[in-house]
Image (spheres, grey):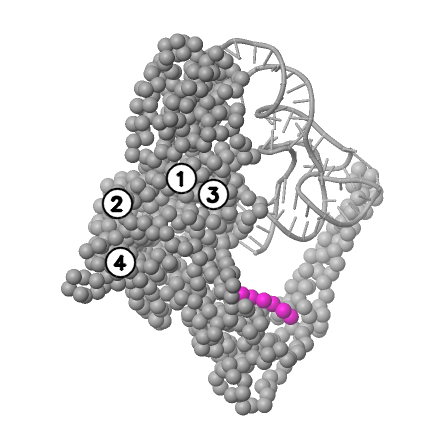
Amino acid sequence: MKATSSPQDFKEKDLKIDGLVLFAFVSVEDQDIFDTSVIAKQGANVIEDAIELIEGFPDKIEEHNKEIREFNEKLEKRRKLAKDNPKIPTPTESLKSEKKLIMDRKFYTVDSILVYPWAHLSRFLSQEKESMEVCPKIASILSDRGYKADFSPFGWYKSFSLNCLGHEVAEMYRDVKLSILADEVRANSVFKILTEDGKVLHLYDPKKDTKNKDIVPDRYKGKEWKSFQELIADEVLGSGATQKKEPPHIKMMQSMELADFDDASDAGNLRWYTKGVLMKNLVKDYLENVMIENGAIYADTPVMYTVKNKKLTAQTARFPAKTYWVHSGNNRYLLRFANDFLLFNMFSQMQIREESLPLGVYEWETYSFRREQKGELSGLRRLRAFVMPDLHTLCKDLPQSVKEFKKEFEMVQRILKDLGINSHIVFRATEQFWEENNDWIIKSIKEWGQPAIFELWPERYYYFILKFEWPVIDSQGKSATLSTIQIDVESSQDYIEQFGEKRQKYNIIYTSKDGSTGHPIILHTSPSGAFCRIIWALLESNEKYKDEIVTGFKTWLSPVQVRVIPITDKDKRYAEKIMIKLNDVKIRADYDDRDEKIGKKIRSAEVEWIPYTIIVGSKERQNNTISVRKRLIGEKLVDNKTNEQIQDIKLADLKKIINKELKGFPRKELPIPFRYYSKKISFR
RNA sequence: GCUUCUGUGGCUUAGCGGUAUAGCGAUUGAUUCGUAAUCAAUAGGUCGAGGGUUCAAGUCCCUCCAGAAGCUCCA
């Protein structure tokens, strides 16, 4: 028997099934037909879960009732106690009521299953022929697993009625999203350390080692390696068992008025205040400059894409649960969770000459969306909407991609240094790639001078054969990745074979002078990591090292770079003029015009991590000079000394100092209401 | 998504059955000050939302919302 969309083809009069039948209504949507075997298997799994639920239902009720009885007994005891002892308050909880089975226990079983195609479950039914394959496939998978399963060759319209057991198990809706996964590959990966002098140390092998074993090699046991030990714990073993508190960067981002939660949006979608936006725009400009220097070009692709394009589905199906859907007319679209899809689609439509390679294409992803699990969201570390600068570099072949990789490795190190972020390196590769390429990787790590963790996979599961990550450890020992570089050998292909299936890819082609063509290797690079994570890393590392290092942002990133403080009212006009002159040359300066004592104003400037504080009194006013407190941001904290005093210099001298420090970095102006302390806008 | 915890003036917080405690900030007044917090007064609260128990509910119970931690997860 074959499935059909024409009921008249079905010759039999009726479909006879005895006993207690589980009806599984199935709708097939466009993205599902990308691989009907995979979706059928997932459908069958859901049906098996449902059977388990039904058969376990009486036991669940029993358990529930037991809980209620225990609760009521306790309550009764406390009531009696309260009666005898006036000091004990009477509990007022009302009795919880027991749940009851609707029918006899013996009815909660499944004798057979009918898989039934039913259009009414979805507004986005697939019209493709392959969609008819899904129900027979589900039935056959279930049969193979030992169930008595059948499928209806077509769905009746609305004219049937069903009598059900009881509502608790009678209707269960599950949205099964196509999900291509191969967990075995990752489960079998081994971890090693590549030491700063180029030696390989064993770290963890899931087949030999247990997770509670102390796996840190002796040479990294010392206190100076604390951060590296935390990285090992977090990357290899999963986070430590210790109960962690709320990460401090959350209070910091709020009190510094950088970013905040917004209860009128979906969780993980933050609002950004002026100072946060200022920092974001500075990072944006900075990265753009670095990308241009590095030879990249720009693109900007749409934020939503269709699921009807099979080139895209091959990749989107990896993360089915993480998608935001947008409805538009009779269509629906995925909000992008990376820009790769539409960028690669663009690449596949481009004329690419071999001599243009390597070609970097940079996109500042205005926003990407991943519907992360609710419990996974945490301050700025993981959000559902984030801005992710992304560079893709098309390379002729593997040797060229390795050459580019090394260049980008240097670029990432420079970016992190310019931002003021200290990070580790973790890399992951297939065993084969490591065997063939470890010489240059070892050389790079040696030059960097710190130990790195690496993970080797027996086979390639992801689209890349090598991935470098730059994780940062926060004040509580949790790690999160900022920059990444990957070598993608898969996306540009026409088709790939994977787990016995032929899967469509983007078919990106370059043409050589002799007319021959090739598929480029693509480097995926996130030069800095998501913007929110940059702020996360900066706030957390300031908190982490606040007793050792003077806190603050690099001057080019500081929302306010200079604060001008007058000592008395007589100095106010002079102070204001200095503030105006600095802003005239695009140095972000504000002016503390409050009627407060000097000590308090200085304290405010210190608490706000302002790099330069100018103090002017009668002496400076008469000499036409300024006195400067330079905050020693990033330097070792000795005897609680956070600043260096520069007395009685000309304003021009300070401009020189600051301009030198800002050389090569972008400049943005401080919004006017922020230039006067008393007029500053408060967001909270 | 599951489990646990948290939610009190703009901010930080005390109170945990008898209609709100303090500090910061704000406002007003005094003070004109030389390198990390000047003094005083005033205003500001349907205690996250809704429902319930009680003579009485920030306080106990239920539901929801938001945030955090742990688990699962993180191309």
The magenta-colored residue range is A170-175
- Are marks 3 and 2 in one subunit? yes
- Magenta highlight on residue A173: yes
Q: Secondary structure at mark 1?
A: helix
Residue displayed at 21% across by 62% down? A511
Please state the chain letter of the residue tagged with numbered disc 3 in the rendered image: A
Mark 1 is on which residue type? Asn
Q: Which residue is mark 1?
A: A281
Q: Find the residue positioned furthest to the left.
A: A514
Main secondary-structure element of the magenta-colored stretch: loop
**Considering the image in quadrants, where does the C terminus of chain A appear?**
top right
Callout in the foreground (1, 2): 1
Within 10 Å of disc 1 (Cα), the crowding (few <14, some 14-19, many 20+) is some
Secondary element at image label 2: loop
Badge 4 amino acid = Ile
- The residue singled out by tag 4 in the image is A521
Q: Residue at x 72, y 70 (%)?
A: A102
Which residue is label 2 attached to?
A: A294
Say whether disc 3 or disc 2 marks the residue closer to the N-terminus: 2
Give the label, 2 or 4, closer to the camera.
2
- Same chain for the residues under marks 1 and 4 in the image: yes
Q: Please, is residue A392 above or below residue A311 in the view? A: above
Residue in the image at 47% along x and 16% along y: A572
Label located before the other in sequence (2 or 4): 2
Q: Where residue A589 sits in the image (x, y, percent)? A: 42, 26
Q: Chain of mark 4?
A: A
CA distance for labels 4 and 3: 33 Å
Q: Amino acid at mark 3?
A: Leu
